Image: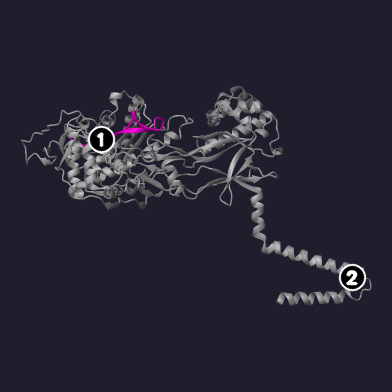
């Protein structure tokens, strides 16, 4: 209100001032002139004080620009401190093709042509062999640059850079320089000497006036960081970055998304010209990172990871499957010690069009019908509910009808009686269907969920698939029957590893994890990732029984191929026919073979699951016992040797009922198995 009265008084005085003049036109002119002067003065005051920061910011936005370059990311280590991913200081050279008049001369200097350098020294009256070698040595960082690199650079006048705006979106701008060679492993000091020497030689020989050029620095470099993977393993887990250091897959992607591994962003700052282009002149500067990213320690053992990848590659080349997965997990802590998926990307190989697909961690992204490896889950649920014991006897006829579907047992037209543990040992479908029927649909569904099926494990990797498990209310009787032996359900290799951990670790579902801790650049632990027991699924006693049953499978059943002389191993095979949409039925020539097991069974240290999808092998080889079992055995053998695990068969024996006891208790034990010579079907 005060401002209103002040203005009112001012205009009244102004009116009284111009009123004595007789000419009305003069009065109007004076009035308008004074009014406009006041408006201009007020606006000037506003720009100078009230809107100062806004307009300065706008000017900077119009005349300054930045190009993002790679910042220093944190390191990724294995469980023993072996570096899996590190950032290495490099330089990237650029040139300005439009400013180079004598391109042929420039090219000769870049390629360190002796005649050209000699000509320069003669012009300076300083030619000598020592001076010639000195110039060549200073230009040595350009030895990474080829004639082809220069030719490609000459064809371009600018590069297109992506700049992140205030709205968070990336915008493309044209920058009047071209990358000559990215990520060259030379020191910043040597790069500076090379650039200075090249410019000095070029301007001396070309006769061009450096100071009359808009961009006198015809060549320059930017210090940045290159991501390298020194041990060369674990690409499907660790992942990879792009040219500007952004994570594309694996932990590199996830840890960047969570802002754990990335440091402050580095921007190459320059000036914009009238057309809005960013150029790098004398005013250009680099805003270096104030803080580099945190380091991450994983649960992976780099040496075992190497063994896994080499083994999977060997069988992959022999059988040419769609993929092979292998996951090694500590059943008590949930730590993933090794995880591989063939085909995988090798850090040493040249990137091809399909390299992204090779970075796919299929052990969490590719669910499949698992087959008979699901039978122990059904058995454990029924025993845990008190509906059966491991010695309960089941009538297993040659054929067994459910709805309009007829199922056959594994004994080629013979009616047999099987104890519960023998149903698992010989992988009998008719027997396991009856066990599932005793359990019932609702309870079976409850246990499947408790074992972790139909939902993500929560592993610290991107792209995990939860698999597929329909609600029990939608199950028809035939579907329920096939669910008991691993059809009409989709699971991942990691889900199976977590489920088998429940069977052998005392009955707890433990969350799988692949990150152990986050550490800052000084070595201080910022965050630990403790093992998490999510829930109790089965009792300790049921878990002990399942360890015995799984051991019997290996000692005299479908998993006999994984039997060791000095170690007790337990596990289960799974041969699942694949549905072929072309013929609208399950194919007899396409299978997914799985073996899931644990060792040593007296005190299981590891759970290992191997999955092979669509191996290209003869028909008589299409069994998990001939496909997945050999891979499991080779990996288990290497693991036991690497970890120097003490043999347990020297101290323990396996009784006929599946109980593992000390030799001191029963030293005269001889394992008997009446059905040992029967044909193994799964």
- Residue 141 place in picture, x, y as percent: 53, 31
Read off the residue under disc 2: 27
Front residue of 298/142: it is 298
Task: State which quadrant residue 423 falls in.
Answer: top left
Q: What is the crowding at mark 2: few (fewer than 14 residues within 10 Å), some, or many (at least 20)?
A: some
Q: Residue at 64%, 59% (x, y): give it.
A: 53
The quarter of the image holding the C terminus is top left
Could you tell me what secondary structure mostly forms the magenta stretch?
A: strand
Region of the chain picked out in magenta, as a range: 567-594
Task: State which quadrant residue 47 falls in.
Answer: bottom right
Residue 183 versus residue 59 in the image, above or below? above
Front residue of 1/476: it is 476
SS at circle 1: strand
Quick check: is 590 in the magenta stretch? yes
Front residue of 104/479: it is 479
Residue placed furthest toward the right: 22
Q: Residue at 19%, 30% (x, y): give it.
A: 411
SS at circle 2: helix
Q: Would you say 24 lies left or right of 442 here?
A: right
Q: Is residue 557 visible?
A: yes
Q: Would you say 368 lies left or right of 402 here?
A: right
The answer to whether the residues at label 1 and label 2 have Cβ atoms under 8 Å apart is no
Q: Which numbered disc flags the more N-terminal residue, 1 or 2?
A: 2
Q: Would you say 318 lies left or right of 99 here?
A: left
Residue 263 versus residue 412 in the image, above or below? below
- Residue 35 place in picture, x, y as percent: 81, 68
Q: Which mark is residue 407?
A: 1
- Residue 41 place in picture, x, y as percent: 76, 65
Task: State which quadrant residue 650 falls in.
Answer: top left
Q: Would you say 252 lies left or right of 97 here?
A: left
The quarter of the image holding the N terminus is bottom right
Q: Single out the mark in the foreground, 1 or 2.
A: 1
């Amino acid at each position: 209100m005060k401002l209103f009265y002040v203005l009112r008084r001012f205009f009244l005085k102004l009116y009284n001032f111009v009123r004595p003049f007789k000419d009305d036109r003069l009065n109007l002119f004076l009035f308008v002139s004074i009014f406009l002067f006041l408006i201009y003065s007020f606006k000037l005051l506003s720009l100078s004080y009230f809107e100062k920061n806004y307009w300065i910011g706008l000017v900077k936005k119009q005349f300054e620009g930045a190009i993002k370059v790679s910042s220093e990311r944190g390191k990724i280590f294995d469980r023993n401190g072996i570096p899996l991913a590190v950032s290495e200081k490099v330089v990237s050279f650029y040139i300005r093709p439009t400013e180079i008049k004598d391109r042929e001369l420039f090219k000769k200097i870049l390629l360190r042509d002796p005649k050209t350098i000699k000509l320069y020294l003669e012009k300076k009256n300083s030619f000598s062999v020592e001076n010639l070698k000195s110039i060549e040595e200073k230009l040595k960082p350009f030895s990474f640059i080829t004639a082809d690199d220069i030719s490609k650079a000459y064809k371009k006048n600018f590069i297109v850079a992506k700049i992140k705006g205030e709205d968070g979106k990336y915008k493309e701008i044209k920058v009047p320089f071209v990358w000559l060679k990215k990520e060259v492993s030379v020191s910043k000091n040597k790069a500076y000497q090379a650039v200075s020497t090249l410019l000095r030689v070029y301007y001396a020989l070309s006769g061009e006036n450096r100071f009359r050029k808009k961009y006198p620095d015809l060549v320059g470099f930017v210090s940045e960081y290159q991501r390298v993977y020194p041990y060369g393993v674990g690409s499907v887990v660790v992942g990879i970055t792009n040219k500007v250091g952004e994570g594309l897959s694996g932990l590199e992607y996830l840890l960047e998304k969570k802002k754990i591994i990335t440091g402050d962003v580095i921007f190459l700052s320059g000036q914009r010209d009238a057309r809005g282009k960013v150029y790098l002149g004398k005013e250009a500067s680099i805003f270096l990172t104030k803080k580099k990213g945190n380091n991450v320690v994983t649960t992976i053992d780099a040496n075992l990871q190497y063994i896994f990848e080499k083994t999977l590659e060997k069988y992959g080349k022999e059988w040419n499957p769609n993929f092979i997965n292998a996951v090694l997990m500590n059943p008590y802590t949930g730590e993933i010690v090794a995880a591989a998926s063939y085909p995988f990307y090798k850090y040493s190989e040249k990137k091809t069009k399909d390299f992204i697909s090779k970075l796919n961690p299929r052990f969490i992204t590719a669910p499949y019908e698992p087959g008979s490896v699901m039978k122990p889950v059904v058995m454990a649920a029924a025993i845990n509910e008190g509906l059966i014991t491991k010695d309960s006897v089941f009538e297993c006829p040659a054929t067994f009808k459910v709805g309009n579907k007829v199922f056959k047992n594994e004994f080629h037209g013979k009616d047999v009686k099987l104890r519960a543990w023998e149903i698992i040992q010989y992988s009998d479908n008719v027997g396991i269907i009856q066990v599932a029927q005793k359990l019932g649909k609702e309870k079976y569904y409850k246990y499947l969920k408790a074992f972790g099926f139909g939902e993500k494990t929560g592993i610290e990797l991107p792209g995990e698939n939860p698999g597929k498990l329909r609600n029990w209310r939608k199950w028809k009787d035939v579907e329920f029957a096939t669910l008991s032996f691993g059809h009409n359900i989709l699971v991942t290799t990691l889900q199976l590893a977590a489920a088998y951990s429940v069977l052998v670790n005392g009955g707890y579902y433990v969350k799988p994890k692949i990150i152990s801790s986050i550490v800052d650049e000084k070595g201080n632990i910022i965050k630990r990732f403790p093992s998490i027991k999510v829930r109790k699924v089965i009792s300790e006693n049921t878990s002990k029984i399942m360890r015995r049953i799984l051991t019997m499978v290996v000692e005299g059943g479908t998993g006999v191929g994984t039997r060791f002389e000095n170690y007790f191993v337990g596990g289960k095979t799974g041969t699942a026919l694949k549905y072929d949409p072309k013929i609208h039925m399950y194919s007899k020539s396409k299978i997914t073979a799985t073996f899931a097991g644990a060792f040593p069974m007296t005190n299981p240290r590891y759970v290992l699951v191997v999955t092979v999808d669509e191996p290209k092998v003869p028909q008589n080889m299409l069994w998990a016992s001939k496909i997945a079992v050999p891979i499991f055995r080779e990996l288990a053998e290497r693991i036991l040797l690497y970890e120097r695990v003490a043999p347990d068969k020297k101290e323990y024996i396996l009784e006929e009922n599946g109980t593992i006891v000390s030799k001191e208790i029963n030293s005269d034990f001889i394992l008997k198995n009446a059905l040992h010579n029967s044909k193994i079907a799964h």
